[in-house]
Image: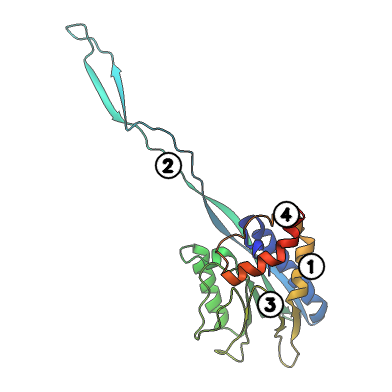
Amino acid sequence: MDPYIEDPEVWSDFHARLAAEISADLNTQIQPHYVARLTPRVTYEIIEIAEKRGVIPDVAVWERPEPTGMGGVAAIAITRAPVSSAVALELPLELFTIEIREIKNMRLVTAIEILSPVNKQPRHEAYEDYQRKRRALLRSITHLIEIDFLRGGTRPPLAEPVPPAPYYVMVSRENKRPRVDVWPIQLQDELPVLPVPLLQPDPDAKLDLNSVLANVYTRGGYATIIDYKQPPPPPPLSESESQYVDALLKPLRQNV
């Protein structure tokens, strides 16, 4: 994995390209009995815009000329000046689910969810929306695959602890619940080939995440877009992860 992909300037494009690549890869395997489709949903990403701070008076003083018997000013009024603040902008964010459907009746067989930062922020409405959708899928006869390629945020819950890792993939087969298969993925690990369950007695499709991500990375031009001279985006890497990234990028940084 490449932690630089988690930069907000990159992630939205990466998410869309990854969903499209997974869908295309699966369609080469599962047709003509199934089809993998992209289902978009729109949420809103909250961006707080902070204005430059300046010197703002606490009060304003103004005079209202008014004739009096003495010919002077009748009164001096004092009023509070407005307080400068900022608003939170809500920008539309399009997310994609990969849905595998049976052709003859378009029944939903398998849902593949790629988590985004908004799905892992408990105070964001997209977090609650995704938790509701996840619970509904886990109560249904639909298989669920959950791909979490984000180190930060709050992960969807599991009933039992799994080995700590920055990235996870979960496969939940509807006929084996509540048991699920989980792949904890370290930064330096090769990504797994995932089994993608279909309807019985059809065999699983195979999703080679390593190959899929290599295609996404190349077609997205991320080697050109990402500035690898800068530190990775938050959250901070562990000491061992930092050493791995530094060693990997050392030749590139020396040639700049």
Quarter of the rendering containing residue 205? bottom right
Marks 1 and 2 in Cβ contact (< 8 Å): no
Q: Nearer the viewer, mark 2 or mark 3?
A: 3
State which tag comes first along the sequence, 1 or 2. Answer: 2
- State the mark number for residue 189: 3
Q: Earlier in the sequence, mark 3 or mark 4?
A: 3
- Please tell me whether mark 2 sits on a helix, a strand or a loop: loop
Residue 68, x across and y down, in percent: 19, 9
Residue extending furthest toward the front: 254
Mark 2 or mark 3, which has the lower sequence index?
Answer: 2
The reply to whether dot 3 and dot 4 touch (C-beta < 8 Å) is no
Taking depth in this image into account, of 106 and 109 the one nearest to the observer is 109
Residue 211, image quadrant: bottom right
255 up-or-down from 186: above or below: above
Nearer to the camera, 226 or 255: 255
Q: Is residue 48 above or below residue 243?
A: above
User: Marks 1/4: CA distance?
Assistant: 16 Å
Query: Percent from the top left, x then y, of residue 201?
Result: 74, 93
Is label 1 or label 4 in front?
4
Question: What is the three-letter code of the residue carrying label 1?
Answer: Asn
Disc on the earlier residue, 2 or 4:
2
**Point 48% across, 38% down: residue:** 52
The span from disc 3 to disc 4 (Cα, nearest Å) is 24 Å
User: Looking at the picture, does residue 202 appear above or below residue 29?
Assistant: below
Residue at mark 2 to residue at mark 4: CA–CA distance = 34 Å
Amino acid carrying label 2: it is: Ser
The residue shown at (25%, 13%) is 66
Q: Which residue is mark 1?
A: 215
Q: Which residue is mark 2?
A: 85
Tell me the CA gap for discs 2 and 3: 46 Å
